[in-house]
Image (tube, rainbow, N blue to C red):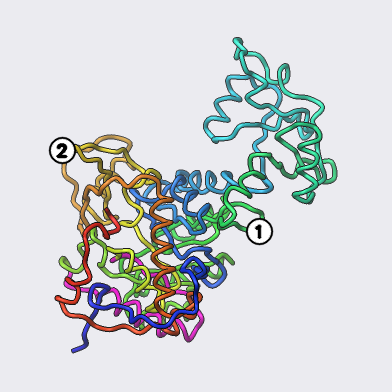
Amino acid sequence: MRLGLTYNDVLLVPKKTPLYSRGEADVTTRFTKNISLNIPLVSSNMATVTENKMAIAMARNGGLGVIHQFCSIEEQVKEVKKVKRSTSYVIENPLIVQDDINIFQAVEIMRAMNVTSLIVMHADEMVGIFTSRDYLFEENLDRPIKEVMTKNVVTANYGIGTEEAKKILHEHRIEKLPLLQDGKLSGLITTKDIMKLHTWPNANRDIKGRLRVGAAVGVKDTIERSAALINAGADVIILDVAHAHSEIVIERIKEFKSHFSVDLMVGNIATGEAARELIEAGADGLKVGIGPSPVCSTRTISGSGVPQLTAVMDVCEVARRYDIPVTADGGLKFPGDIAKAIGAGASSIYSGSLFAGTDEAPGMIMTKDGKRYKRYMGSASYDSNHERKENEQGKKLKEKIDVFVEGVAVLVDYKGPVEDVINASVKGLQSGISYCGARNIKEMQKNAEFIQITFNGWEESLTKGNKLSE
């Protein structure tokens, strides 16, 4: 009978470091075959973890957020679009309106889409631009926007460089620069977006300067949902199934790859055999973790699973032969667990508990006994299933629904901005890289040596205040 180990069962053996400071450690990595990360942190597709605010914060700091699928296709698409519109060098499809709508209608559109300007068209011709300055102090919101919009708009040719765009914006003291190609509107550059390029230098961006974002799908509507999400700009699709080593998942992978060229991350699995079959079916990345999450009860309900460190090692051993990245999903209780997961071969970590309870996580802050909390629900928990059913039917359900449960809902400590959690996690990993005598993640994985410890060895390691949740 094999021995299964998790993060608390081992430590990384310290080795001579070539670094003068842990801050020199390079933490760039890959999430899938073609999707890179500037930091190896990914927020999971859970309803109480990742929507647009979390995904934006993760990408701005160099990681990635995966928009959850526990909503309608239209709702998930809106979340993806909000991320892609939040930061970009060139807005490829700026919002346009016709010049016959009134100020009230235009303002409602801007609020709904979270933008500060609209390009105004008359048929197919651009005739102006409408911003908040155009209706400031305006009392009659029934006035057509063509009466108040900014006319004689300064434009530039599509494909203009950043520095040249800056000069035009500065020279004319404007904040919006529409781009024309063959006389037709083809994009928009804004001062705000250019400033963001400098504010978030480590941001994870696509080739158009937009933040990268992932989106999850299940096996029921894989192709339909994926098509809508990819059309909205999703950079990577995550086929998320509790037990992904199955015939239906293999069929969906092949079907997906026959329709789309976007990378597909597949999980969850826990064995080398699962890794081989999913990779050969076409998976561009693998997600490892059967039951390690604090809000997942799979192991106690089904009696199945593999302790997370062993699962990561087994999957990575196979994935390495195919040059396919692996992300370690769940089981992270301490900052050092990230270093252990990466040292064991994972290219990134994928977590819900690490990022739950932050400002950017969905949900309200609750106060109980003088302490602040946010709710954190397992995707297979009763609470999560009940809320999804209510959303589907559009009404409150008082009766208990009949559903198989493999998760729980808990309260987690309120943690403040997710950026603080990210920074602490990255510093811990950089320290781990240094202790492994390495300069980067690849060297760390080559040098990593684990030592199995006893319960007393673990007790000796503990100090107060070093849990990720504290």
Q: Which residues are magenta?
A: 302-331
Label 2 vs label 1: CA separation? 48 Å
Rendered residue at 52%/70% (across/down): 26
Residue hosting label 2: 369
Q: Amino acid at mark 2?
A: Asp
- Determine the residue located farthest toward the front in the rendered image: 20
Rendered residue at 25%/57% (across/down): 465
Q: Which mark is residue 271?
A: none
Q: Secondary structure at mark 2?
A: loop
Q: Is residue 262 magenta?
A: no
Q: Amino acid at mark 1?
A: Ile
| Residue neighbourhood size for the residue with mark 2, other residues' Cα within 10 Å, grouped as few (<14), some (14–19), many (≥20) | few
- How many labels sit on residues? 2
- Tell me which corner region of the image, top left, top right, bottom left or bottom right, holds residue 44: bottom left
x, y percent for residue 403: 20, 54
Q: Is residue 124 above or below residue 340?
A: above
- Tell me which corner region of the image, top left, top right, bottom left or bottom right, holds residue 310: bottom left
x, y percent for residue 210: 61, 52
x, y percent for residue 72: 42, 46
Q: Is 286 placed left or right of 190 in the picture?
A: left
Q: Which mark is residue 207?
A: 1
Q: Is 449 placed left or right of 62 in the picture?
A: left
Front disc: 2 or 1: 2
- Determine the residue located farthest toward the right in the rendered image: 182
| Residue neighbourhood size for the residue with mark 1, other residues' Cα within 10 Å, grouped as few (<14), some (14–19), many (≥20) | few
